[in-house]
Amino acid sequence: MPEVSEAGPAQPDIAAANRAVRDRFAFDDEQDFKDARRGFIGTAAQRLIRDAQGRPVWDLQAYGFLAQDCPDTANPSLWRQSRLCREHGLFEVTEGIYQVRGFDLSNMTLVEGERGVFVIDPLLCAETAAAALALYRAHRGQRQVTGVLYTHSHVDHFGGVRGVVTDEDVAGGVPVYAPQGFLEHAVSENVYAGTAMSRRAAYMYGAALPKGERGQVGAGLGQTTSTGAVTLIPPTVDITRTGQSETVDGIRMVFQLTPGTEAPAELNIHFPDHHALCMAENATHNLHNLLTLRGAQVRDPRVWARYLTEAVDLFAASSDVAFASHHWPVWGRERVVKFLSQQRDLYAYLHDQSLRLLNQGLTGPEIAERMQVPPALERAWHTHGYYGSVSHNTKAIYQRYLGWFDGNPAHLWEHPPVESATRYVQFMGGADEVLRRARQSYADGDYRWVAQVLGHVVFADPDNAEARELQADAFEQLGYGSENGTWRNFYLTGAHELRHGPLGTPAATASPDVLAALTLEQLFDALAIRVDGPRSWDADIIVRWHIDQGETVTVRLRNGVLTHVTGAGPAAVPPHVEITLPEADLRALLLGALDPADLAARDSVEITGDAGRLNELLGYLDTPDPDFAIVTP
């Protein structure tokens, strides 16, 4: 696709709005900068972290431009947050506890024990995790890793595990801790809807965008996502209850389970001997997502607030520092209590007020426009919507309780986007008339409307270069004005794709390690998601698998649905084909690593019946598209 134009300057109204932000908030408050730099020990001399093939997966100096004053093309509040998040290196949190920050979207925490070091949340990819551990060892000595802990089930908190330990280490007794339910949620989230989530994450984090004042400046929670190898070693020890205590390498830990907060499986950790509290991702220096823009199940702000209250009650009185898996710590017991309490009040307020307004009949978008955070909370920098936002979080609460339908029958059976767009443009007098009016709206500074109305022209006529360009211009201005890092990334990625074509998906989370961690139940569920229903309406195929561990699984494709049962299934319905094979071969076949034509040639495989029916079944599977269109039809 030919280039249309490059990123432009901020329009005068956006520049003025950004300058007004400086007058609204306390930019002279330097406490966060002091905290973000406190305990700094050193950073890596080599600023590019590369994979085994030499490809860069993280650049420590990519955000050097943030040292300059905030330009008109960025919201000063987001610029401030990004300057804080770009601090990178090894930091001492308190005696015996260290963090490597700025080496990925998340932090790696290292707790020194009697013999070695205990690693918490080994980043997103193996390469950045290995670099973080190397930095720690360069300053603290060649301590062996004596344990690993995943605080929750999101990939930036486990994906780098093979950069710090090996399978042999774990087999030799190095424990891997995680909250109960971790593996189920970590695997299912990244496989069932993993392709769509990864594609949307490319927009959310802007990893492929150019870094700079007119491009990607950060994502609020951290700067962006690394693009190395996502790995996973399954946990060996589950944390199953609040109050559970574990000691590893002389390190005492007391756990608080917090399921349904920032992740379906999550925990906080208190270190009583260090008077330190790890809040995982339940309390960070921003308003978090109740529904992440990459897509996920809606989180529960009511439960989130209650667990924050519980954390204060359980641990605050004996915690001199609170730190998390993102951002920088908070020191001092009074400050810890204030920080956690304000975070609690933020989620509780959004929940309660959204419910109050929806019970008055307001819809999600209406609630989002009306909702305002109390001034006392808004004055605290850590409540700002750099990652989550008041706007999309209140819509998420509406969705959690009432779903997508707002009760208006006019919205019950709307035409899909392309068909709607074609009709809208016709009703508006054609594309030329819409563009004429949209140019005036752009001149008036109504960028939200320009983006909305030109979406119809682009979906009705995706080759309309003028519509694409003007919508890209509107996206750009909305991005320049966004305090929320992920909103900025969405807008600017949309503008880039309108002008230059798709950026693709920089990082896929359904890696070989994640796929290998699927249970057989999950594996067959993942297979069922890929069945092309309409093509297989008339198919009726039964395949029985006899797996080397003595387990039998019978699958049946009928009515476009692939079902599976453990065991032989209905005795009256014999299978079309029976296959005896090792579990490794079954996994390789179903994951596409083994060609069905090569299956019968294996000495470990026995096939009876019509092998062609297996080929027919596999032929009905659809292949996900990791680069599907978003801003165009």
Image (spheres, grey):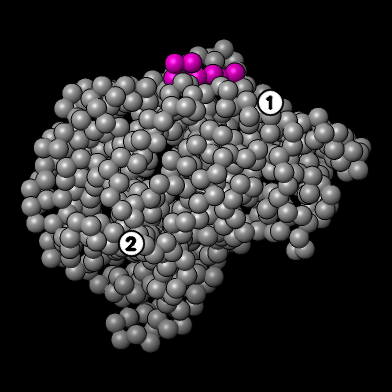
Looking at the image, residue 623 sits to the left or right of residue 36; the answer is right
Under circle 2, the secondary element is: helix
- When the figure is inspected, residue 515 is found, relative to residue 313, above or below; the finding is below
Where is mark 1, residue-wise?
409
Q: Image point 50% across, 19% down: which residue?
A: 373
Q: Crowding near pointer 1: few (<14 within 10 Å), some, many (20+)?
A: few
Task: Residue 258: tell me if it is visible.
Answer: no
Residue in the image at 75% along x and 63% along y: 1
State whether residue 122 is above or below residue 478.
Answer: below
Q: Is residue 630 left or right of residue 43?
A: right
Q: Are marks 2 and 1 in contact (CB under 8 Å)?
A: no
Query: Which residue is at the front of the view, 56 or 505?
Result: 56
Q: Is residue 341 visible?
A: yes
Where does the magenta region start and end? 370-377
Locate residue 383 relative to residue 480 in the image: left or right: left
Closer to us: 330 or 431:
330
Q: Nearer the viewer, mark 2 or mark 1?
A: 2
Between residues 381 and 151, which one lies in front from this camera angle?
Answer: 381
The three-letter code of the residue at mark 2 reads Ala
Amino acid of disc 1: Pro
On the image, the x and y values in percent for residue 96 come to 16, 46
Q: Position of residue 65 (x, y in %)?
A: 54, 49
**The disc label shown at residue 131, or none:** 2
| Pointer 2 or 1: first along the chain | 2
Residue at the spot 19% in from the left edge and 30% down from the top edge: 319
Residue 554: % across, % down: 36, 63
Q: How many marks?
A: 2
